[in-house]
Amino acid sequence: MAKIKITQVKSIIDRSERQKRTVKALGLSKMNQSVEVEATPQIIGMVRKVNHLIAIEAI
């Protein structure tokens, strides 16, 4: 599987509880924090739900 780098670029303040939990499940807890994860169908689905809060780049 390919890896992707996910960076949180917007705050989760004033977002729905579902979006907050999705960002946390991706492994992000602070602004400008990055994580590298495998691009599984589950991760891609979570990324699509919060794509307005994060930046994605392929590795």
Image (cartoon, rainbow, N blue to C red):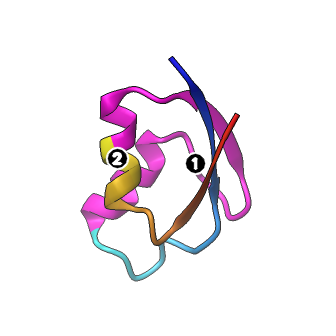
Q: Is residue 23 above or below residue 3?
A: below
The residue at which mark 2 appears reads as 46
Q: Is residue 22 magenta?
A: yes
Report crowding for label 1: few under 14, some 14 to 19, many 20 or more residues within 10 A (C-alpha): some
Query: What residue is at 46 percent from the left and 48 percent from the top?
Result: 24
Observer-nearest residue: 34 or 51?
51
Q: Is residue 13 above or below residue 6?
A: below
Q: Distance between the residues labelled 1 and 2?
A: 12 Å
The extreme bottom residue here reads 14
- Residue at (55%, 62%) from the top-left corner? 54
Q: How crowded is mark 2: few (under 14 residues within 10 Å), some or many (20 or more)?
A: some
Q: Position of residue 38 (x, y in %)?
A: 52, 24
Which residue in the rendered view is the most extreme toward the top? Answer: 1
Q: Is mark 1 on a helix, strand or loop?
A: loop
Amino acid identity at mark 2 = Met
The residue under label 1 is 28
The x and y percentages for residue 52 are 46, 72
Badge 1 amino acid:
Leu
Determine which quarter of the picture holds residue 45: top left
Is 15 inside the magenta-drawn segment?
no
Q: Give the range drawn in magenta.
A: 17-44
